[in-house]
Image: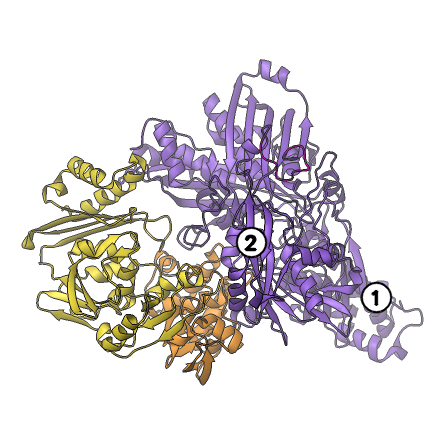
Chain colours: A purple, B orange, C yellow
Amino acid sequence: MSTTTGVGAPIRRKEDDRLLRGRGRFVGDVALPGMRELAFVRSPVAHARIRAIEVPPDHAGAVFTGADLAGDGVRAIRAASGLPGFKVSEQPALAIDKVRFVGEPVAVCVADTRAEAEDIAAAVFVDYDELPVNVDMLEAVKPGAPRVHEHWPDNVILETRTGGDLSAVAATAAVRVSRTIRTARQCMVPLEGKGVVAHRDRQAEQLVLTTSTQIPHIVRAGLAECLGLDQGAIRIVPPDIGGGFGWKGLLQPEEVVAAWLALRLDTPVRWTEDRREHLVAAANAREHHYEITAYADARGRLLGIEADALVDAGAYSVYPFTACLEAAQIGSILPGPYDFPHYRCRTVSVATNKPPLVPFRGVARTGVCFAMEQMIDAVAAAVGREALEVRLENLVRPEQMPFDNVTGKHFDSGDYPESVRRAAAAIGVEGVRERRARGEPDGRLVGVGFATYCEQAAHGTAVYHGWGIPMVPGHEQAHARITPDGGLELRVGVQSHGQSMETTFAQVAHEVLGIPVDRIKLVHGDTALTPYSTGTWGSRSMVMAGGAVATACRRLAERVRRIGGHLLQVPAGDTTLADGCVRAGAASVTVREVAHTWYRAPQRLPADVDPGGLEVTAGYKPGSDHGTFSYATHAAVVAVDPELGSVEILDYVVVEDAGTMVNPMVVDGQIYGGVAQGIGTALYERMPYDAEGQPLASTFMDYLIPGFTEVPHVRILHMHTPSPYTEFGVKGIGEGGAIAPPAALCNAINDALAPRGATVTDAPMTPEVILEALRRAGGPA
Amino acid sequence: MNQHARTISLTVNGHAVTAAVAPRTHLADFLREQRLLTGTHLGCEHGVCGACTILIDGEPARSCITYAVACDGRSVTTVEGLDADPLAAELRDAFSAEHGLQCGFCTPGMLVAARDVVQRLPDADDAAVRVAMSGNLCRCTGYVGIVNAIRRVLDARKPRPE
Amino acid sequence: MKAADFDYAAPRTLDDALALLARDDGAARPVAGSQSLGPMLNLRLAQPGLLVDITRIPELRDIAVDGDALVVGACVTHARLEDGGYPDPTGGVPARVAAGIAYRAVRNRGTIGGSLAHADPAADWVAALTALGADVIVAGPHGRRSVAMADFIVGAFETDLRPGEIIAAVRIPALSERARWGYVKVCRKTGEFSHATGAVLADPGRGVARCVVAAASGRPVVLDDPRLLADAAARDAAVAARLGGDPAAIRPHLVALRRAVAQVTP
């Protein structure tokens, strides 16, 4: 692109120095005078009535319950979908009368140190009258199942139906393949847990929350609803955030409690989620169950897909995304990047006695891709062709772009089949086939697998309205101000939690204004300082906020050229702005001089100068409301140990089309990191529950996330099809890496197991799952 | 103050420190809450994730499962104490060049562990680097950038053939 | 989570340590590197009244050759064993085992004695020292006693240690020149606790042919029968008979042992 630091340049990050020197400021690093620490009493049972909460006399005044909150008028968290039939849950920040999952906060304890707060929590006695438990969503939808919310007739939060009748297709299709496919309940596990410091700012007369959130403006809205305050009476200040991945994209009950306590006690309070709390009380992602059937012709050309998809949505509807975002997404995105004519999908969001489901990086796409890509391979097997060929046969073709698929998804651009071909070439399919034919000296089984997906990102107004989510994104805004010394300040309401926005938004601004990247400062998230935003989720920030930054900077550029032209005594139209200078022929004036003129020497300004000066707030929406469609094909080669069921990833290739990349190094980093999380979903991560709803993993010793040796040196190849609808042609790609690994690895494992006649369909594909598949197929080894 | 509090004397980042600590206070909490050295992060508090890795007498250790009271007489170095360390500076540069950090939460522990790997295993290939670093978890980077950064420093320190 | 409150003492002599451990009513616990106990304390799974830190006792930190054995003090860290630099009549086996324990930062603090006292069935020293035929030297209020590893580990997280006793040292018999060592752990992740461990010592010079299966639900299975090295079917049957239960659960143990045997079979 235009400069070595603008859009397209893989420059180093502005964030790095402070983080590398241990000078970041994370929520746990925030200490305020008089600050007290909180620990929560959490339910040890999955479903019970609370008979009594007994606080030892020593600790009177240090323990607060749901009754105390209710007494102060604090309202329950309520996240209602606009979709007809949605059942709304009421989630008190501290449980009242009933607990509905293990880990649900029941009381909060206040002390000078966290250790002492935990001492108090251990001394609080809660008398539970245990109730029957819903652990399995398939059981929970049956008549007579215990009800999570007793005033509901059943545990169905919402049922949706998409598409039509496939009986004609079913009657005539040459091939019919059915599968039952499941993804496990997972934790998101940012390395930093959730945390919040709440205090009263007496001067501003505001409740201030320093909270590790992805959605500060939405947290403010939710808090205002719960606490009955004006939004103007609340300020949310996100600090550095140690990863989020979705877990920090909701209003937490703990935030409500901390906020209320800071006001009630009139003293700062801090809560930091520890790892055990995170694993036990926040196992809240990914749990899908599919009954899916594919119909195809004899070549493997898809004729139709029918699916029943159940999502275990847990006990409550999270604010703002609700308990049905995931299932609603499934209905509309299950067809993925495939072009076929007939479709029917029923989705059911099921309430169970588990933590509330929260959208995790990739949201429903990871499960959908896992299901759909297994079906492509299954159809290929049924018609006796290479899965690769059947994939190519069915993908949307470049000449169809822009393309509206069977559910009306508007694909903006790209060459999906080419991504498959490049992935096949890069992974060396022929070589793998030869290697497989030779066999491994150690007896392991080698296989290759593919998965292709589209990543709809930066979802627009119509999409979110269609999903019934109460928080519908509209225009995104950015504020840009040239400082009196010619630097630039950007203000955006999205919130980086590792995405490198301080760097990439500076690159966008530099591209437009030519101001050096190191003189551009990003202020993000703080509700007192930044424009309203729905926040950072859905791979939207670069498309939306980046677009807004570009728009604001363009407006600034016009004003800079206007003033600069005046100083050069030429019309603005005769000037150019580049490299920090307004030029007209051989004459030039720097942005710094223009800034000086506006701020310090206004007597030199033109009489008709724009009184808005050198600061602009601009709103932005892409040219299409459907969101962007990046896409990728992942290819994996695995070796499966048939004696132990273990899987080694021998090679992993991603061919990704992110459109225009603002910082290719950052894009690659997002993909590497996403793939690592996807490998976790594929092979390692699962929160097991016993029949009583007890989570059986509570440490990193029993909940395994991939480490250095479990993640291969992923190879990334890029394609570049700029979006026709966005600034610079960028597309959202933040989640993509995490979408395909379970599917690609499942297909690779099944390719490896094929000679033994075994098939796996459930994630994670642990040794137990693989050995069980081998056993069913006639015994391992 | 805690009824079992003990007074300890130790060196923290080169400075002599005498402080009263509750025996149950782990070293990370002591550093963070009492010394305000918040560069040391807590990711699990059960010794697995490595975010809290610091140096005790020059050797990497988990500060979440080491108690401050047990460090009487020891020399403790945190990421802040490596600010002027030449090898740490090389690693910081390499981590930035290779995008070996995103959110930065695991980074201080990564740097301490990486510094030890560079010193202890100068001939390590990428596979050996991965095994040696496996006590530190990162949820953002997929590890590629971190391995590349360590590789870069190892290669730069290899004696060049004449 | 933060540990429940406890008191702390760091005696400088073994006698002082034993006195502290003896005078208490069972609420005292010895601690060395705190790499096993630390997580349990932080999770409040262990709530001792007094921690007796034994790492300041010089004699517990010695490594020495005594006659035909390597004697390793209880407070010797895994990292020190890993790094070598001590006279070793056991052919480097402890160094190799130590190098595979958890992670370097843990090995720098964690000790051989602490690991044994914790007695996690999946722990490397539980498996390896049993296969090596080591003895545990225990110090207590009534003096010292030596316990064979096979008798020391009584069950999962259970040892032969009596109230007031601590591990003083581990005595590992020297191996002959012809000794071969096989050791295989089944882990899903590097540094993770083993799900199944097979350890084999074939030392024809001393007439030892020992197979050990560890990381099952209880104490290690020890098979001292030279014929089992060559006869896989008999070996599998012997292990299965000792472990009992679900064949699927036994399977990784059989595989681990088979692969460990392969390492000693020329």
Residue B48 seen in this snapshot: yes
What is the secondary structure assignment of the residue under circle 2? strand
Labels 2 and 1 positioned on one and the same chain:
yes
Q: Which residues are magenta?
A: A145-154
Mark toward the start of the polypeptide (2 vs 1): 2
Residue A16 location, quadrant:
bottom right
Residue at x 67%, y 64% (from the top left corner): A261
Camera-near label (2 vs 1) is: 2
Residue A638 location, quadrant:
top left
Residue A149 painted magenta:
yes
Question: Where residue A203 sits: x, y (%)?
Answer: 77, 75
Kindly identify which chain the residue marked by label 1 belongs to: A
Residue B8 location, quadrant:
bottom left
Residue A404 painted magenta:
no
Q: Nearer the viewer, residue C95 or C147?
A: C147
Q: Nearer the viewer, residue B150 or A269?
A: A269
Q: CA distance from mark 2 to mark 1?
A: 65 Å
Classify residue A218 as left or right of residue C183: right
Note whether C26 is above or below A725 in the view shown. below
Q: Nearer the viewer, residue A348 or C244?
A: C244
Dot label at residue A86: none
Note whether A99 is above or below C46 in the view shown. above
- Amino acid tagged 1: Arg
Q: Which residue is denoted by mark 1 in the rendering? A: A559
Q: In terms of secondary structure, what is the magenta stretch mainly?
A: loop
Note whether C145 is above or below A397 in the view shown. below
The reply to whether discs 2 and 1 touch (Cβ–Cβ < 8 Å) is: no
Dot label at residue A126: 2
